[in-house]
Amino acid sequence: YLARAGADTALLEAQKVGFGASGRNGGQLGAGQRMDQRDLIKLVGENLGDQLWHLADDAIDTVKTIIKRDKIDCFLRPGVANLGNSNVEASDLHSYAEFLEKRYKQGNVDIISKEESLELCISNAYKGGILFSNAAHLHPLRYALGIAKAGRENGLRIFEQSPVQKIIKGDTVTLRTNRTLVKAKYVVYACNGYLGDLEPKVASRVMPINNYIVATEPLTDTKHTVLTKDIAVADSKFVVNYFRMAHDNRLLFGGTESYGYKFPQNIDTKVRKPMLKIFPQLDNIKIDYAWGGTLGITMRRMPYFKRLSKNEFNISGFSGHGVGNATHAGKLIAQTILNQDSKGFDAMEKVPSLPFPGGRFARSPLLVMAMTWYSLRDKIGL
């Protein structure tokens, strides 16, 4: 957006475009913010809460507009379902759909009964849920590379393999990479889970965690059917299981987490366990590919938007909900820097953001303890 407006814009990428969560995520363009809208309204009030809901709606439209405008071939398909793992969770999702329809009257949230969930998702794991017809799913790496291509065509300079090692602040910000010095009038931190200690004000509020995905061999036999509609699904577990069918008829299944930057050697084995718990009919199906990715989470699972100084901005902490919200964040930050319209950025910045407890050294062990507890609750059905 900055480059399209004629601003001299450079992207300093530590690895390659799409290396991080942008290219390795589950490809779900989800509805709403990452936080339950009912809880979000309780946190920030009705006026700001409603504004945040509409910003999330705008994010979906922004992604679809970019894909159409720039002719990005990323297998965009409509529909994301949230399914409950228990009767209580399914009932809560039904109440959520009724709340959204009553408050926003959008007509794009459908209730899925227990019987309908069995027809939609061939598994006994789920007791019902909701379907967002305006949400969507896509191939994330194709999408990220398509955005980069469109950016270059509009004057964006992308410097890959150029990690920023030091930032010297002032009226003009100087960034030292492994190759050179870059001077800029404005700097945007968009590092999500890969910031490290580059900016301590952000690092205290955005924590890296890892999530894992497998791709099965193509499912050609009807006895291996897992979804009867071409939609994406996320369930109600604290450590979310999410899945969809890829364009080549493979099941893409994501689940399990770890903390820090080290990945396990046996990703396929780790993810296969929750996959078979939901879809035992895939017991003899091979896993062809397995990978992990690092994302940035916040304490409240809401993105962390912040003016760090008069010429430094942060947008990160999308907490697994970044396909739409991170894309739209680029539009909001451009509007703010160009003095066009800062209302969207201002609204996101008003969301209270808490630092992780424990400081620089203790926060990761404390997070592991908390996440392990919630993961245990998932396993024993609490």
Image: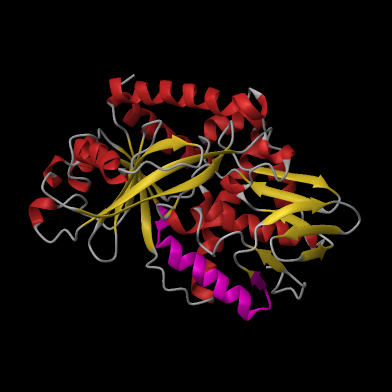
Q: Is residue 54 visible?
A: no
Question: In front: 116, or 301?
Answer: 301
Quadrant (top left/top right/bottom left/bottom right) for the N terminus: bottom right
Of 170 and 112, the residue lying toward us:
170
Residue 274, x across and y down, in percent: 26, 37
Query: Residue at point 57% right, 52% down?
Result: 325
Q: Specify the quadrant of the image occupied by residue 350.
A: top right
Q: What stretch is highlighted in magenta?
A: 133-158
Residue nearer the viewer, 140 or 46: 140
- Magenta stretch contains residue 134: yes
Most extreme residue toward the front is 178
Quadrant (top left, top right, bottom left, bottom right) of the C terminus: top left
Say if residue 367 shows up in the picture.
Answer: yes
Kindly give the residue lying farthest to the bottom in the view shown.
Answer: 153
Left or right: 96 as drawn, with respect to 318 = left
User: As drawn, is 169 to the left or to the right of 46?
Assistant: right
The colour scheme of the drawn protein is: secondary structure
- Whole-percent x, y for residue 41 in the image: 60, 32
- Does 167 lie within the magenta span? no
Spot occupied by residue 230 in the image (x, y as percentages of width and height): 28, 58
| Point 72% across, 42% down: residue | 349
Count of numbered circles in the view: 0
The percent position of residue 278, horizontal first and vertical second, equals: 21, 38
Give the answer, above or below, for where 334 lies relative to 310: below
Q: Which residue is drawn at 12% across and 44% down?
A: 281
Q: Which residue is drawn at 40% across and 61% down?
A: 138
- In the displayed structure image, the side of residue 16 where residue 217 appears, left or right: left
The residue lying toward the viewer, choosing from 19 and 321, is 19
In this picture, is 49 found above or below 336? Answer: above
